[in-house]
Image: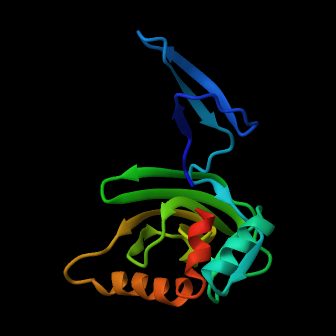
Amino acid sequence: MGVRYIISDGTLNSPLVTEVARETGKEETTVRLYEVQNANLGNLSRTKIVTAQSYDDAVSDLREFPDAAILLGSTSLPADLVSAHQARLTIIKGGYHITAESAGTSLLVLPVQFSHCWELVGEPGGKAGLFRANIVQTAIYFQGKIDADLRFGFGVTNSSCRKRDGSDMRKYFSAGRSKMYKFF
């Protein structure tokens, strides 16, 4: 989800985290800084896609297919996705800047909450588009190369994108709502 560091006053014993710093206070309380291994920093490229028709299905699919991107609803992506390389996500005023290269069509799962208000601005290269992935994240597909901004386009003249976000919630989340809360 884009979390790179965890601060804890307890000890974490997991191969997924490494303690990188520790500080003990006056009252002998210790705070530790852990780094999450393989954190998604905007460079998570998936070549396997699983399509779910509801949030409950997506939760099950996340558990069953941990190396796949779980997309909600129908999508039209090629079956022969390749891993992106040199992917970089940087924060800019009003959004993010994304650069990456690919030998074909690639899908990046960004550590950014999905909204229909996100817009690709600049040079997305060839074909490019945005999808909801892994329930809450933004996935971007592109061909060849991308060097574009991801801008949040919500405003007085564009409120329909938030209505589409609400529609997603009603469409995918309404059935089995209590099961979703158990996931988190």
Residue at 61% in and 67% down: 182
State which quadrant residue 141 falls in.
bottom right
What colour scheme has been applied to the protein in the rendered image? rainbow
For the C terminus, give its image quadrant: bottom right
135 or 141, nearer to the observer: 135
For the N terminus, give its image quadrant: bottom right
Q: Is residue 166 visible?
A: yes
Farthest residue to the left: give it.
Answer: 156
Residue at 63% in and 46% down: 39
**Is 14 displayed left or right of 89 in the figure?**
right
State which quadrant residue 15 falls in.
top right
**Is 177 displayed left or right of 107 in the figure?**
left
Q: Position of residue 50 (x, y in %)?
A: 74, 77
165 or 89, nearer to the observer: 165
Q: Position of residue 86 (x, y in %)?
A: 64, 50
State which quadrant residue 180 falls in.
bottom right
Residue at 42% in and 57% down: 96
99 or 68, nearer to the observer: 68
Q: Position of residue 53 (x, y in %)?
A: 65, 87
Q: Position of residue 172 (x, y in %)?
A: 56, 85
Above or below: residue 179 compared with residue 18 = below
**Is 147 displayed left or right of 135 in the figure?**
left
